[in-house]
Image (tube, helix red, strand yellow):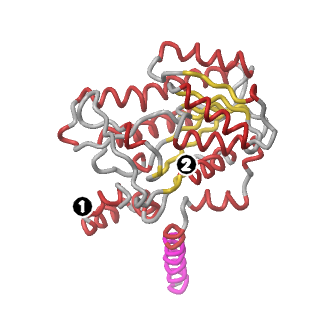
Amino acid sequence: MAFFFNFVAISFFLYHLVRLIMWAVLDSDIELFFLSKLGRPISSLRGKVVWITGASSGIGRDLAIALARQGVKLCISARNISELLKVKQACIAQSNGSLGPNDVYVLEMDMLHLNHHNDYFNMVLDHFKTVDILVNNAGRSQRAEWGSINIKVDRELFELDVFAVINLSRVALNFFARNSMKGHLVVTSSTAGLIGAPNSGTYTGAKHALHGYFEALRNEYPNVHITMFCPGPTATNFLQECFTDTPGAKYNQTVQPTDRRMTSERCGHLYALAIANKTHLSWVGTFPINFLLYIGCYYPNLKRVLLKIVGMERLQRVRDSR
């Protein structure tokens, strides 16, 4: 009996040690890593209609291109129509002839116009007749000290990053239900949606809120596929558009070439794989992001000890990819 318990204890220890080592060298969670090797390829989505909000730049842009390479029909939406048109041309060029101009629909859209979400959805239906997958990618991040944030900023960020996402998802959900479709709702969350990110209190709260909303939805509608995708620091222009602690102000900083960030192209590719495999939750990032996430998600008590050892200054440097 003693041998059995010792064997179980050692096996448990080795199992988690191996996982920690893998997290130190991989740029995604272990499930997504194995699915990238043995799961469904992105090409399994060929012919599907995928709507990506916030597709004019960054992760949304590179996700669109990764899907277009495999013949996925796209609706790409954002406020910046000129940038969307550039993304459309890039998607068609990268599709190796599998997509034509009518297969990439450009929709000028402001997510904050909640009263028009039904109208936007109907415009996509008029073009494609259906929507198979909605990717809620539009949103903004934040850099601000918790105690100095004006409450108006909290409301503005939640309007964009939470309420607009929930409202458009409900429109899609009702469409899926009316047409007896399983459907697939995808949300660009963040590593800040899994552990508290310093200097981003409102943004962290918004991403945690999304996980709560969609976990409840998953329990109520088990036939609807829901994927929460959580990127770590990524080399995009998101810092320029970040909320701060002041209403109407932007952070207006740029990502530096020396920052330790995942490329937007790599993030878009992994995102497409997560969608193709209908993962419930996936996260990606460079070391030590995945290591910290593993500890934070599976060993919250150990996380508190680790944060005391690391200290907020070092954690902030990790947050800023430095």
> Depth check: 148 or 71 in front?
71
Q: Which residue is mark 2?
A: 281
For label 1, the residue is 313
> Is residue 222 shown in magenta?
no
Helix, strand or loop status at disc 1: helix
Q: Position of residue 271 (x, y in %)?
A: 60, 47
Name which residue lies at 54% across and 70% down.
22
Q: Which quadrant of the figure contains the C terminus?
A: bottom left
Give the spatial CA distance, label 2 vs label 1: 29 Å
105 displayed left or right of 156: right
Name the secondary structure under disc 2.
strand
Does residue 28 lie above or below 199 as drawn? below
Please name the amino acid that badge 1 sits on: Glu
Q: Earlier in the sequence, mark 2 or mark 1?
A: 2
Above or below residue 134? Residue 19 is: below
Q: Is residue 74 left or right of residue 59?
A: right
What span is colored magenta in the figure? 2-20
